[in-house]
């Protein structure tokens, strides 16, 4: 059985605990083929930026973004709406 490998855009919302009572909510958008991959990218990114372990990150919601107008990250929005030829890296001699 073949699975679709189309890249989709996911928004991940979570609460990050940083010792004691310090906690904050964070939202990020990722390009991934499935929600599990977006969560893995989220853990990796937030863990490296904020220096927290995975057990300190509580993922609350993962949603697939279907409309390019709903994308908040300008880089991901540009990648979603751009023509494929514009995104190709030119050949260097």
Image (spheres, grey):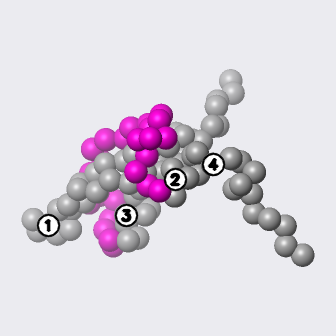
Q: Which residue is mark 4?
A: 82
Q: Quadrant of the N terminus?
A: top right
The quarter of the picture where residue 28 lies is bottom left
Mark 4 in CB contact with mark 1 (< 8 angstroms) = no
Q: Mark 2 falls on what kind of element?
A: helix
The stretch drawn in magenta includes residue 20: no
Sequence-wise, which precedes: disc 2 or disc 4? 2
Using residue 28 as the reference point, say whether residue 91 is left or right of it.
Answer: right
For disc 1, the marked residue is 22
* Tag 3 near tag 1, CB within 8 Å: no
Image mark for residue 44: none
Q: Secondary structure at mark 1?
A: loop
Q: Secondary structure at mark 4?
A: loop
The stretch drawn in magenta includes residue 54 = yes
Quarter that holds the C terminus: bottom right
| Residue bearing mark 3 | 46
**x, y (%) of residue 56?**
26, 60
| x and y percentages locating residue 62 in the rendered image | 37, 41
The crowd level at tag 3 (other Cα within 10 Å; few <14, some 14-19, many 20+) is some
The residue at which mark 2 appears reads as 76
Foreground tag (4 vs 1): 4
Q: Separation of disc 3 and disc 1 at Cα?
A: 15 Å
């Amino acid at each position: 059985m073949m699975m679709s490998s189309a890249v989709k855009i996911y928004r991940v919302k979570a609460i990050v605990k940083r010792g004691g009572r310090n906690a904050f909510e964070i939202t990020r958008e990722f390009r991934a083929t499935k929600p599990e991959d977006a969560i893995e990218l989220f853990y990796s990114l937030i863990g490296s930026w904020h220096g927290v372990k995975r057990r300190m990150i509580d993922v609350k919601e993962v949603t697939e973004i279907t409309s390019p107008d709903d994308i908040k990250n300008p880089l991901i929005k540009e990648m979603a709406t751009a023509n494929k030829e514009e995104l190709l890296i030119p050949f260097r001699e």
